[in-house]
Amino acid sequence: MFSAEQYRTKAAEYRALLSNIPRSPQETSEFRNLEQTYATLAENEEWMAINIDKTIQRRKYRDNRTGLDKKEEQVLRCMVDGPDHTAE
């Protein structure tokens, strides 16, 4: 997995390709799309680093699928029961 800085470096490479040599409209569009994709990936990676506490974490032992933690169980109950059964 790349870091946000690596994604930004890749976006800068595509930006540089746009400024050095005249390109066809198709190449220009493709390089702009790639630049935007890598810039977005960098932003997403930064958001994940800042908001890691707001994401669902992988279990330490993925093979143990027998039990859910309390938050997972509550989320699933709310999804099944609907919004009327959220306060338990």
Image (spheres, rainbow, N blue to C red):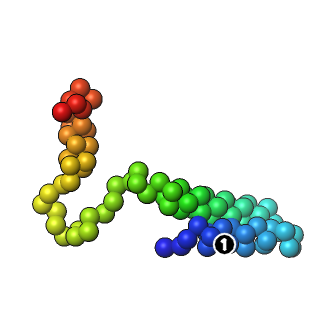
Image quarter for residue 22? bottom right
Viewer can see residue 53:
yes
Secondary structure type for disc 1? helix
Count of numbered badges drawn on the protein: 1
Viewer can see residue 82:
no
Residue designated by label 1: 10
Residue situated in front as seen by the camera: 31 or 55: 55
14 vs 75, left or right, is: right
Query: Could you tell me which quadrant the C terminus lies in?
Result: top left
Against 3, residue 45 (above or below) is: above
Image quarter for residue 38? bottom right
Q: Residue at the spot x=40%, y=54% of the render? A: 53
Q: Residue at the spot x=68%, y=72% of the render? A: 9
Residue situated in front as seen by the camera: 62 or 35: 62
Residue situated in front as seen by the camera: 35 or 69: 69
Q: Residue 16, how many percent across, how many down?
A: 79, 71
Q: Residue at the spot x=58%, y=67% of the render? A: 4
Q: Residue 18, how many percent across, how many down?
A: 80, 68
Image quarter for residue 56? bottom left
Q: Bin the neighbour count of mark 1 within 10 Å (Cα to Cα): few under 14, some 14-19, many 20 and up.
A: some
85 vs 35, left or right, is: left
Q: Residue 13, how many percent across, how many down?
A: 73, 73
34 vs 50, left or right, is: right
Tell me the kind of residue under disc 1.
Lys
Residue furthest to the left in view is: 66
Residue furthest to the top in view is: 84
